[in-house]
Image (spheres, helix red, strand yellow):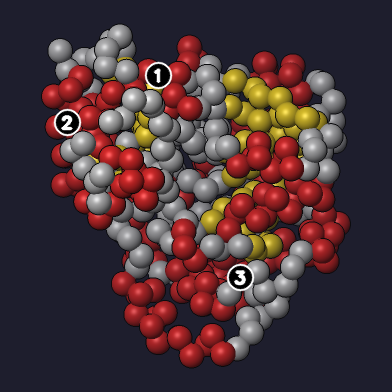
Amino acid sequence: MITSKEHFHGSDLEKIEKYYGIKKEDIINFAGNVNPLGISPVLRSALASHLDAITDYPDREYTALRRNIAAYIDKDTPSDNKCNIDHILVGNGSTELISLFIKFIKPKKALILSPTYSEYERELKLAGSMIDYFPLKEEENFQVNISALKETLEAPYNLLIICNPNNPTSTVIRTETMAEILTFCRDRNIYCMVDETYVEFAPDISSATSVSLLSAFQNLIILRGISKFFAAPGLRLGYAMTSDEALLQLVNENKNPWTINILASIAGEIMFSDENYIQETRSFINNERERIKTELSKINTIKYYEPNGNFILLKLTDEHPDSYEVFEGAIKKGMMIRDCSSFPGLGNRFIRFCFQSKEANNRLLEYLYQTLHS
């Protein structure tokens, strides 16, 4: 008999299976924030034909991979701000890169925009850094208050961490606003680490990404990966961009070689060139995002916050049910959403779900309407 409340993350399907006695294959994962199209058919067939490559070492510099990343990024970047291949560093997922940059920046004190992804906090604690949190407030629709942020940053911080678009709020800081933040930070010798894991899902990528600011701001570090947009978390491939060449050299000289296996490297080269898959994903997510917003507006006991990723945050405006009860009701129907009560500052009135297939989305929308509409 279940007597206590558990919190589950998007990767916790095995834990869900054990806890609720539901086979993980029977659960639609609305909590993982992964591209519902799955891996590209082009990638699937190409990987099968490259299996013999595992008898070779990867290129130590990952030159072809970094070149393809640069070409991919440039498609959403103004022509006068192209990405420099020498400013790209690849790693074993963005988690390795977060760890490396924190290790070599050595921030005595860091500020994190919150609520957000918990890995930043973990890595900072491992580095012995002091951590403060700048709250994104519900009454401001979880949009960053620039004046308040600047006032907070007057304290002696060494690092500011921003997830953009942010998880779990799906809010975004536009490029021109990010430039204002970066200018303020640069004048105070503060590094700014911007995690763009979800930026490729944004309705307008060019106005959400900070890539065009790299050449002007050496204090900017951008992180991305293939886990979410390219639906390949198991390959563990991430990349970072910064124009701080001294920091890049320091990280490169001290990081372990070959942390990306050769199949992941080949997969990356293929993924970033797979234009049909990229455009199909963006079209599907953009269409579903608008359709889901329309359907959610028909439920009179929720409020949604304008989504800029492939997921949406909802507030439950009635006292009952709470977020855990809605989560548990969904699980019992084979759907896993995110109970956001474990995120600091959200409490038990917030849930989050990502966009799956149209059929799956309809199934979840029907459940939410039946459970929440009064």
Q: Nearer the viewer, mark 1 or mark 3?
A: 1
Instruction: Write down the residue under mark 2.
Output: 367
At label 1, the amino acid type is Asn
Q: CA distance from mark 1 to mark 3?
A: 39 Å
Against 24, residue 16 (above or below) is above
User: Which residue was labeled with disc 3?
Assistant: 260
* Local secondary structure at mark 2: helix
At horizontal 60% and vertical 42% (from top left) the residue drawn is 119
* Circle 1 SS class: helix
Question: Quick check: can you spot residue 113?
Answer: yes
- Judge left or right: residue 253 versus residue 182: right
Q: Residue at x 76, y 23 (%)?
A: 153
Taking 59 as reference, is 70 above or below it?
above
Alpha-carbon span between mark 2 and mark 3: 41 Å
> Which kind of residue does numbered mark 2 sit on?
Tyr
User: Residue tagged by mark 1?
Assistant: 348
